[in-house]
Each structure stands twice: as structure tokens, then as C-alpha cells.
């Protein structure tokens, strides 16, 4: 029976494309609540780091912050090297959606990580073919919104300053529209820079039975309420049990999830 094994959590200054970021005390509390369960935590640490950003991790290391997590998802190899140099005991998942688009990439990164996440920027057929050629089990993105743009610059703050507007750049209700398209793309500025997200959630469903050598799938939420989150988890749980794709999409449609 399919089961949720891990919860991926965000932390300010470390996480990338994470809808909610917990405080240090909240993460300690979450970890304590999970101690007598089968669930474990994964830390989203997928941002890009400067040397100063890496040095700022020392206080967290000293307080045992990373002991709360079984794995860490990352995209900046400097982070992995830094944590290893500090003897932090944690397992590594390399996750960078624009990388790992072919089996040669995946197999190379597989050698130096506990897991890698295959790119969500390739076609279904390419992903299916890739999973037949990997040298050990991998992870795939089942559901989520990928970032189609990331800059460490405060682009919204700069824009509002240039236009002499008083808008708060840290609100999460801004969108951009391309000149020749009608899709509204969410744009978010926070402590790590500016991110533009895809307009809809990408979904892996009918492809699942054709994938090989996949151990876990990641479900990511963005601006969804708890009711919709639970419906998506239930939809995937049912899909993995009975392989009823029509039922899966019906559940998503009932809750108005744009995919």
C-alpha cells in the first residue's frame, strides 16, 4: 500500500520554491511530533548560496538543526561540500529541475548522492526512457509548480522603486503575463531573490506505470489550501493502488486543481 514516508519542509534563507517556511522552533516541534511515527523530515535547501550564506549556516549546525532531517534536497554543490566539511551527518538528494535531463547526467550524479530527482522539464516519453537507463533508483516530481525563472536580485523591489510605487514586494499575490500569451505566472520575491513559477501544476499520472527504477515521488504544493492538499495526496494514493487514471483526474477536477 502506498504511504507517505517523508515531509519536505522549508526554512527561511535556505529553501527555494517552498510555499511555507517554518521557524527553527517549529521545525524542532515538528521533529518531536514525528519521533514515534514512520515519518521523517527532508529539508528543502535548493537555493543558490554565496560564501556568506554558507558561513551563516554555522549557528544552525552548532544548534543541531540538521539533526532533525534524514535528507536534504539541494542544487548548489557548495552547500554539500560545506556541510561535509563541517561533518554534518545527513543524506543528500540532488534536485535541480533544469539539470538531469538525460541518463548520463543522472548516473553521474547518482554516484555522489543518495538520490537524485529527474528533471521535470523533459517530456513524458523522455522521462520514461531515462528511467530505464539509470544505475540506481531515483526520485521523480509527481505534482508541483516548477520555477521557470530564478534571480538572486530583488526584481520586484527594484521595479516598484523605479516606478515610484509603494507596493510591498514581499506579498505573494503578484503575477506577470508574457506579451504573446495569456497565462498568469506567479512572481515571488523573498530573502533568496525572485522566482517566477509555471502557471499550472504539472502532473505525472498515466506515465507512472511505465516508469522504472523510481523509489519515491515528490508532491509539492503552492498556494493550495489544506483541503486541496489532502485531496491530491488521496488521489495519488488511490492511483498507485488501483491505477484508475480517470478516477484520479476526476478527483483533481472536483477540487478545482489547475493542472
Image (spheres, grey):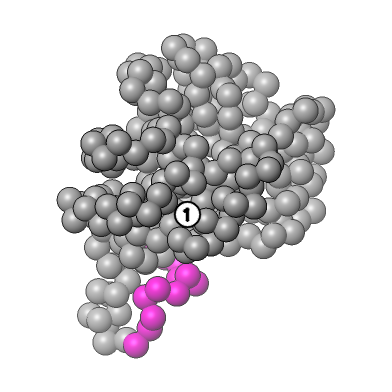
Q: Which portion, as a residue range, is magenta?
A: 166-179
Residue at 43 percent of width and 25 percent of height: 114
Query: From the viewer's perspective, is residue 174 above or below residue 209?
Result: below
- Indicate whether 244 appears above or below 107: below
On-image quarter of the N terminus: top right
Q: Is residue 253 above or below residue 39?
A: below
Q: Is residue 111 left or right of residue 58?
A: right
Residue 187, visible in the rendered structure: no
224 horizontally vs 108: left or right: right
Image location (x, y in percent) of residue 23: 47, 63
Q: Nearer the viewer, residue 50 or 154?
A: 50
Badge 1 is on which residue? 10
Number of disc labels = 1
Residue 58 shows in this picture: yes
Residue 10 at x, y = what percent?
Answer: 47, 54
Q: Residue at x 57, y 50 (%)?
A: 31
Question: Which residue is depicted at the point 37% across and 54% down?
Answer: 63
On the image, the x and y values in percent for residue 195 come to 37, 58
* Residue 97 vs residue 32, the one in the foreground: 32
Amino acid at each position: 500500500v502506498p504511504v507517505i514516508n517523508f515531509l519536505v519542509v522549508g526554512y527561511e534563507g535556505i529553501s527555494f520554491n517552498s510555499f511555507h517556511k517554518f521557524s527553527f522552533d517549529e521545525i524542532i516541534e515538528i521533529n518531536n511530533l514525528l519521533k514515534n511515527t514512520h515519518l521523517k523530515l527532508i529539508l528543502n535547501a535548493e537555493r543558490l548560496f554565496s560564501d556568506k550564506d554558507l558561513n551563516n549556516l554555522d549557528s544552525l549546525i552548532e544548534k543541531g538543526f540538521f539533526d532533525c532531517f534524514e535528507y536534504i534536497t539541494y542544487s548548489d554543490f557548495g552547500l554539500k561540500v560545506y556541510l561535509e566539511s563541517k561533518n554534518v551527518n545527513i543524506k543528500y538528494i540532488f534536485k535541480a529541475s533544469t539539470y538531469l535531463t538525460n541518463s548520463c547526467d543522472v548516473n553521474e550524479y547518482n554516484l555522489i548522492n543518495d538520490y537524485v530527482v529527474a528533471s521535470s522539464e523533459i517530456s513524458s516519453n523522455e522521462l520514461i526512457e531515462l528511467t530505464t537507463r539509470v544505475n540506481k533508483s531515483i526520485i521523480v516530481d509527481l505534482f508541483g509548480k516548477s520555477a521557470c525563472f530564478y534571480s538572486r536580485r530583488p526584481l520586484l523591489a527594484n521595479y516598484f522603486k523605479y516606478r515610484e510605487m509603494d507596493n510591498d514586494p514581499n506579498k505573494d499575490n503578484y503575477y506577470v503575463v508574457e506579451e504573446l500569451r495569456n497565462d498568469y505566472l506567479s512572481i515571488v520575491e523573498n530573502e533568496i531573490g525572485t522566482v517566477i513559477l509555471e502557471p499550472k501544476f504539472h502532473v505525472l499520472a498515466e506515465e507512472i506505470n511505465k516508469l522504472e527504477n523510481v523509489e519515491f515521488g515528490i508532491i509539492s504544493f503552492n498556494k493550495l489550501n489544506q483541503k486541496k492538499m489532502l485531496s491530491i495526496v488521496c488521489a495519488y494514493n488511490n492511483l498507485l493502488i488501483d491505477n484508475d487514471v480517470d478516477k484520479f483526474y476526476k478527483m483533481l477536477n472536483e477540487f478545482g486543481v489547475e493542472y
